[in-house]
Amino acid sequence: MKIRVHDIKDKELVLAGEEQIVDYPTLHAMETAGECRFVKPLAVNLTVVREYDHIRVQGNVATSVGMGCSRCLGDTVHDVVSAFTIFYSRDAGLPQDEEEVELAEQDLISATYEGDEIDFSGEIAEQVLLAIPLKPLCREDCRGLCGICGADLNVTECGCDRQVINPKFSALKNFKAEK
Ligand SMILES: [Zn+2]
Ligand SMILES: [Zn+2]
């Protein structure tokens, strides 16, 4: 999703649309690597306005991702939603450090643009990546797989004695008993 800087006036400009994953290289790469699959295109809404010496973009992005449950490996689908504010200033070749520190305190994102076009795709992809769950669960109380026989404990109780599989725990038990 792009905009010509020339078209941004003092009045708010709303950009809304569905974006295809293939147009977002970092997201598409995740999908190709099998880390997740996007079950919907990105629904993007941006409000763009010129302010002082920068361009303020307030927006949100939503999609759904299919992933393997981190406990039982079963298929899960998660809604991914993110709201953000980004300040774009023209890249004047100045060091960025100071400004970024200042803005970080407000939990806002600062970015730069060059030329007469702003491409929002990089920042949008970043927001989606941050909102994807790191350890997705098919449900809060997923029981996972048996560490001994690999059975899905949500479906069956295999009857294995799982108390003994973790030597760390047994060491801890002994330690406590000695005290
Ligand atoms: Zn699960
Ligand atoms: Zn088992």
Image: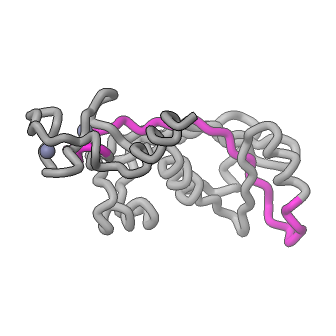
Residue appearing at x 64%, y 37% in the figure: 58
- The magenta segment is 71-97
Left or right: 162 as drawn, with respect to 151: right
Q: Quadrant of ligand 1?
A: top left
Where does the C terminus fall, quadrant-wise? top right
The image quadrant of residue 114 is bottom right
Residue appearing at x 35%, y 55% in the figure: 20
Residue appearing at x 30%, y 67% in the figure: 32
Which one is in front, 6 or 17?
17
141 vs 70: above or below: above
The reply to whether residue 14 is in sight is no
Q: Residue furthest bottom?
A: 93
Residue 42, given in percent of the width and then of the height, sits at 39, 46
The reply to whether residue 60 is in sight is yes
Residue 70, given in percent of the width and then of the height, sits at 32, 46
Left or right: 67 as drawn, with respect to 118: left
Does residue 74 belong to the magenta stretch?
Answer: yes
Left or right: 47 as drawn, with respect to 15: right
